[in-house]
Amino acid sequence: MPTPETTRKLREAKLTRRRVPTGPSSRLIERSYLGLILADVVEPMIEMMLAEVPALLAAAGVRSDSLDLTLRATVGDIRIRFGQLVTRNIFERAPRSAAGETNRQSKRIIRRQVKAALGVSMVDADDVQTAALVDAWVARNVALIRTVESRYFETIQRKILELAPGGTRAVGREGIADAITGVVDSTGRTARFNAARIARDQAGKLKAQLNEKRQTDLGVTEYTWDTSNDERVRDLHAERDQRRFKWAEPPNETEDDGHPGEPINCRCVARPVFDFTGPEEAPSRPLTGARPST
Ligand SMILES: [Zn+2]
């Protein structure tokens, strides 16, 4: 909450500029977030699996009637060892870091906007509590990154088992070796792709949530919808460009709708409308016409 001193200044300030800056896009944060997810979780997982390919091939060399069981046990064993290596702390590290960076950026943006529009300099004590919001976002992101891990091992297990019924007799040792290597490679690419999708969508969502929290905390009730003005903007959002919306009434026209930045992969931003003067006062001039009877 802004301090009483800042609240007073905000109320007394004259609006000097209607169109305030919106700050940088979340692209850089998104990129460093993805880099951390890959370095902490996805690449170690892929490396561990690749290192075990010879063990899988050895398993594939055993009698074909028990091939599926042997392969399943081998992949299951790798997954357990990965779970011991990559702890909860490691899963949290990338989201924590991205959240910290986004939060600092969001604080800088609102300060710049308030300064530009009203000429008021905000101080640290004016800032809103964001710990609960950030914690919820981190928990959600840990869960999402965990799905990358579980889908990776489950997909490899399923695809390798699909190879098993024919066994070595059907495709020969060489054939099954190629097939297993192919499965491990393509599933690794999918895991990297899934991590990139999470980073892109989630970095923008957190930025949007923090900006909303800071604006509404200051008493901003409306924003102007601002698109990134390129061909990737969805038609629905292009129609909303430069129109005013209320924070209290999130748009709800489609299943995946909401304030700017909330729908999946949305890069739109909410430009705050600073107007702390309240509704226009009724004219004090007496009404003309019939005089009130006395
Ligand atoms: Zn959008």
Image (spheres, rainbow, N blue to C red):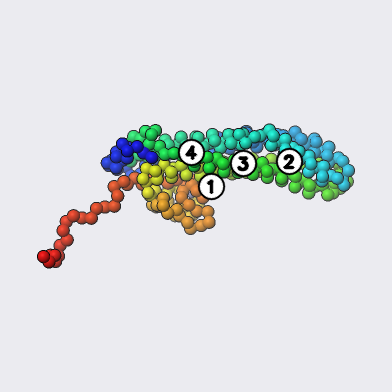
* Separation of residues labelled 1 and 3 (CA atoms): 17 Å
Q: Mark 2 vs mark 4: give the one in front.
A: 4
How far from the left and from the top, in percent, is residue 132? 49, 41
Residue located beneath label 2 in the image: 184
Find numbered disc 3 in the image and state the secondary structure of the residue it sits on.
helix
Crowding at label 2, few (<14), some or many (≥20) Cα neighbours within 10 Å?
A: many
State yes or no: discs 3 and 4 in contact (Cβ < 8 Å): no
- Going by the numbered disc 1, the residue's amino acid type is Asn
Q: Nearer the viewer, residue 81 or 233?
A: 81
Q: Earlier in the sequence, mark 2 or mark 4?
A: 4
Question: What residue sits right under mark 3 in the picture?
Answer: 145
Q: Quadrant of the N terminus?
A: top left
Mark 1 vs mark 4, CA separation in Å: 24 Å
Please name the amino acid that badge 4 sits on.
Ala
Q: Is residue 287 visible?
A: yes
What residue appears at the point 61 percent right and 41 percent down from the top-left corner? Answer: 145
The label on residue 131 is 4
- Tally of marks: 4
Q: Secondary structure at mark 4?
A: helix
Per the model, the C-alpha gap separating discs 3 and 2 is 19 Å
Q: Position of residue 270 (x, y in %)?
A: 42, 46
In this rendering, is residue 61 above or below 262? Answer: above
**Residue at image location 84% in from the left, 44% down from the top:** 67
Mark 4 surroundings within 10 Å by alpha-carbon count, few (fewer than 14), some (14 through 19), many (20 or more): few
Label 1 secondary element:
loop
Secondary structure beneath label 2: helix
Dot placed on the residue nearer the N-terminal end, 3 or 4:
4
Residue 240 lies left or right of residue 202; in this view the side is: left
Give how far across and how far down residue 61 sits, in percent.
86, 40
Q: Which residue is nearer to you in this view: 74 or 189?
A: 74
